[in-house]
Image (spheres, rainbow, N blue to C red):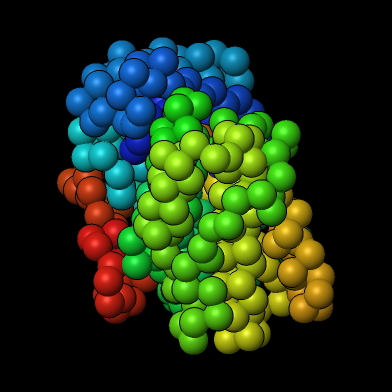
Amino acid sequence: MTVILGLESSCDDSAAALVTADRHILAQKVVGQTAAHQPYGGVVPEIAARAHVEILPALIRDVLCEAGVSIRDVDAVAATAGPGLIGGVMVALLAGKGLALAAGKPLIAVNHLEGHALSPRLADPDLGFPYLLLLVSGGHCQLLEVRGVGDYRRLATTIDDAAGEAFDKAAKLLGIGYPGGPAIEALAARGDPRAVPLPRPLLGSPEPHFSFAGLKSAVQRAVVAGDFRPEDIAASFQQAVVDCLVDRTRLALRRSEAPTLVVAGGVAANTAIRTELRGLAVSRGRRFSVPPAWLCTDNAAMIGWAGAERFAAGMCDSLDAPARARWPLDESAEKVRGAGVKA
Ligand code: KG4
Ligand code: ZN
């Protein structure tokens, strides 16, 4: 059975995993850096890169040891090659290149977004192509038609902030720590989602794009006004994000024949978001698939799995594969008016 070593270091999680082509995770480890970045309310690239250098080699040793697998038994090494914080991306990619060279194994340079995009197929053996994917993470908020391995058509993206970024910024405004998503979700559980009037940017607009910057500013005004309980702000904010995601995805479903709606990326760990999108899929007669929460947030099992899918398709890379800060899944997608540099 094909065994792939997956490596990840594109943001603030160092991770290694051994994954087989028949969907067995032989071992997997993720070490986050929350404590190192917490004082700054966000990820500091230099701190992240140095921490990856310190953490990743031990994780690679650990997963090989735990699975009882030698690097000689591995069929290929899959490492994230972007997009992400370039100093961090280089750590897993160079480690992967070194191991591939030393052990004489093929290298697979994985797009981190493809890791998220294909991760639902690791958890759900019945999920075939094509599917409509809502990819919601700290750096991205996109609707994509996933037609096959390496074959993506972008239907929509954010014109400003990503959904996870909005969660992180709202949490920072509320002073409840980093990463913001889990902190907001926990606080929102005790609040009233109708208590604070907040906008739903782009709701009902004719293209299924997203925007969250205005929502963040409205949260800031609500915090400064001091008239609302923090748990009510958190619950109202989360509900506004859910409403935007559902509305935009509903529109994209009208433009795609894909039989299944899939949600992936760190924000897909959110229970309210999972529940509402499942409801949307069912109401439109589509199948719904979402990976378990641990597979939504950054990990190396998804990188190993994307590697397994690429390996099966004969898509290996040369040892001079570059590390890329920016790397859109759909290279042909046009820039959206108002969009920054994000893909
Ligand atoms: O996919 P991911 O782990 O890393 C990136 O590739 O960006 O996503 C991280 C993002 C962060 O913005 C974090 O706040 C958000 O996912 N997140 C959540 C939850 N768990 C993580 N957002 C909402 N609810 C959650 N439970
Ligand atoms: Zn990610």
Q: Quadrant of residue 90?
A: top left
Q: Is residue 34 left or right of residue 327?
A: right
The reply to whether residue 299 is in sight is yes
What residue appears at the point 79 percent right and 64 percent down from the top-left corner? 279
Name the image quarter holding the N terminus.
top right
Q: Is residue 91 left or right of residue 181?
A: left
Q: 138 and 259: which one is in front?
A: 138
What residue appears at the point 52 percent right and 30 percent down from the top-left corner? 17
Position of residue 23 relative to residue 180, above or below, is below
* Count of numbered badges drawn on the protein: 0
What residue appears at the point 63 percent right and 85 percent down from the top-left corner? 254
Position of residue 313 relative to residue 34, above or below, is below
Q: Position of residue 35 (x, y in %)?
A: 41, 15
Q: Position of residue 4 (x, y in %)?
A: 50, 38
The reply to whether residue 16 is in sight is no
Q: Position of residue 290 (x, y in %)?
A: 69, 53
Position of residue 97 relative to residue 119, above or below, is above
Name the image quarter holding the C terminus.
bottom left
What residue appears at the point 59 percent right and 80 percent down from the top-left corner? 251
Q: Position of residue 11 (x, y in %)?
A: 35, 35
Position of residue 229 relative to residue 53, above or below, is below
Q: Quadrant of residue 114?
A: bottom left
Q: Is residue 281 left or right of residue 149?
A: right
